[in-house]
Amino acid sequence: MPSPSTPPDTATEAGPPLDDPHVIQRILRTASTIAIVGLSNKTQRASHFVGSYLQDEGYRVIPVNPTVDAVLGETAYPDVASIPDDITIDVVDIFRRPEAVPPIVAEAIAREVPAVWMQFGVTNEDAARQAQRAGLDAVMDRCMKIEHGRYSGGLHWMGMNTGVISAKRQAW
Amino acid sequence: MPDPSSSPTPSAPEAAVDHAFGFETRMLHAGHVPDPQTGARAVPIYQTTSYVFDSADEAAHLFELKQYGNIYTRINNPTTAAFEERVASLENATGALATASGMAAEFTVMMTLLEPGDEVVASAHLYGGTRTMFVHTLRKMGVTVHFVDPTNLDAWQAALTPQTRALYGETIGNPQGSVLDISRVAAIADAHGVPLIIDNTFCTPYLCRPIDHGAHIVVHSATKFMGGHGTSIGGVIVDGGTFDFSDYPTIADPSPAYHDLAFAETFGEYGFLMKARAETLRDTGASISPFNAFLLLQGLETLSVRMERHVANAQAVAEYLEAHPQVDWVAYPGLPSSPYHALAEQYTPRGPGAIFSFGLSPGPDGPRATGKQFIEALELFSHLANVGDARSLVIHPASTTHQQLSAAELEESGVGPEMVRLSVGLETLDDLLWDLDRAFHAIRS
Ligand SMILES: Cc1ncc(COP(=O)(O)O)c(C=O)c1O
């Protein structure tokens, strides 16, 4: 597991690690609007869990899914390019088959979105490297809900190892 | 934890991701950051059954597991969470789930993983209570457990069938003092696509961390060395997050017991523990009380210093016994004479715990009577059915812990009538040797 106290393990010659805890924390701390590609309107799907959680945590979630009109009370768009320009997307979170990832990353680059994130099980290293070469932050094979829970302390309530060690009073 | 509705971004201190904290630091700090209102330094006791919700939506999301937080102490509790995260950190694991006892930890693992018709391959060198549960209670659930000589790797392999869903052993088997070759047994489990579960009670994470050697799930009776004080019954399940449950039916398939939630897909490396908590613990109700979690935390904070003294005293007592003319054998893997000495050096380099057995040379009334006379002559060793207390303990297994086993099971478990088991405590070593000396004297005369 990507325990915060273990060094990232995906640094290769091809580029910086794709599970860097600094990058993960930077994205989570600076983003406010997240486009979720493949966000399902079925409430028991993993994507719906993540979308609903991120909304509860105060992020605006923009669904990208050509098969539905709206999810979680937000209008859905068929692709990233179709999201109106007045909505600034801070990160594109991808719940799609690995083969479907490259055009999504290309759209994120074209739109100058600062980060792409591929969910747990979504692994397309070439696409991730392409994003990095274009200057985007890239995370791969990580769940945004779990990573947020790790650093916000939420996962702690479930007995999980957040890796956070501090003798300072927590600030809310 | 931050108020879930307050902020879009994590507000906890940035995790010190570039520094790996040591065992002792985590023993004292993991799982607890002083809270914003009170700044309480010690982990407070949250003696509450339930927690108010911010809104109807938040309540619904908590029940659906879409939001992390506290609902009801049968499921989770802030004091217990501090204990759980601390144990997870010490075992280099992804998370933990505390239970009412060590037996509850084992049962929770089995109920979460298994279905009727499934099989488990387990070491024959197990705590007697575990064996009884596996043979009788798991049979009622339609689960068959095959027991093998844990030191024989071919036996593990030969007992596998297509129905095998897990392997199970103890770090140090009771009463032989057999040290499990964890990485080899883990390789057998990996090749068969099933998790290896290890009961690490006798070692604690200070002496051995089975996940580092390839085990997938660890259980503890926290009643023993973790607490150390002998005040509290408790258990804990630890998941390394290293077993891929995405094809493991009970964790991967949509669960009818949680409106078709697919735990492996939804929670990834946390899927097993989330299911164990949200379904099994919810249904069995075998949860730990917050007060016991608090007491067990007090024990964890001194674990390393206590374990160092436990193993030092145990080694000295074992050496004394081995040299004693009234002792036939001593089964402590810290002795070079033990067949498990090399494995002990590999898996428990700081010392193989403080619980071991030895055989008295039978006196004129036979081995059973000699054992009883010896135990009754001890002044300082407490005669009771427990191990891992700060005080030294003694028991005669054949007439107590292993009494429910048949003669054949006793034989297979290696429990003879001459056998005495010690759990060596933290007393002054000279006093322990003085006490043993007096007891040997008493059975001589
Ligand atoms: C190795 C081992 N595992 C499990 C248990 C059961 O733990 P508890 O008594 O906390 O239920 C014991 C108790 O003696 C034990 O020695």
Image: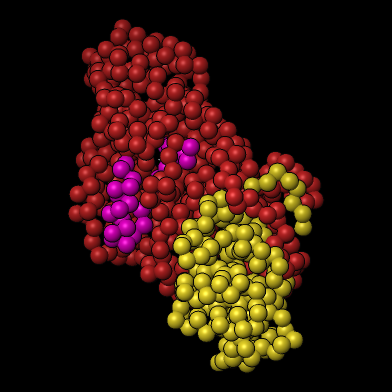
What color does chain B have in the rendering? red
Colour pattern of the rendering:
by chain
Residue B285 sits inside the magenta stretch:
no
What residue appears at the point 50 percent right and 81 percent down from the top-left corner? A102
What residue appears at the point 69 percent right and 85 percent down from the top-left corner? A73
Q: Is residue B110 visible?
A: yes
Image position, residue B385 (x, y; %): 43, 33
Furthest residue toward top:
B445
Residue B189 sits inside the magenta stretch:
yes
Q: Is residue B377 visible?
A: no
Image position, residue B178 (x, y; %): 30, 36
Image position, residue B157 (x, y; %): 22, 53
What color does chain A have in the rendering? yellow
Total label count?
0
* Along the line of sight, the residue nearer the viewer: B210 or A109: A109
Quarter of the picture holding the C terminus of chain A: bottom right
Q: Point out the stretch of residues depicted in magenta.
A: B180-206
What residue appears at the point 49 percent right and 25 percent down from the top-left corner? B309
User: Measured along the vertical axis of the image, is residue B411 above or below residue B11?
Assistant: above
Image position, residue A51 (x, y; %): 62, 76
* Along the line of sight, the residue nearer the viewer: B375 or B436: B436
B234 displayed left or right of B160: right
Quadrant in which residue A90 is drawn: bottom right
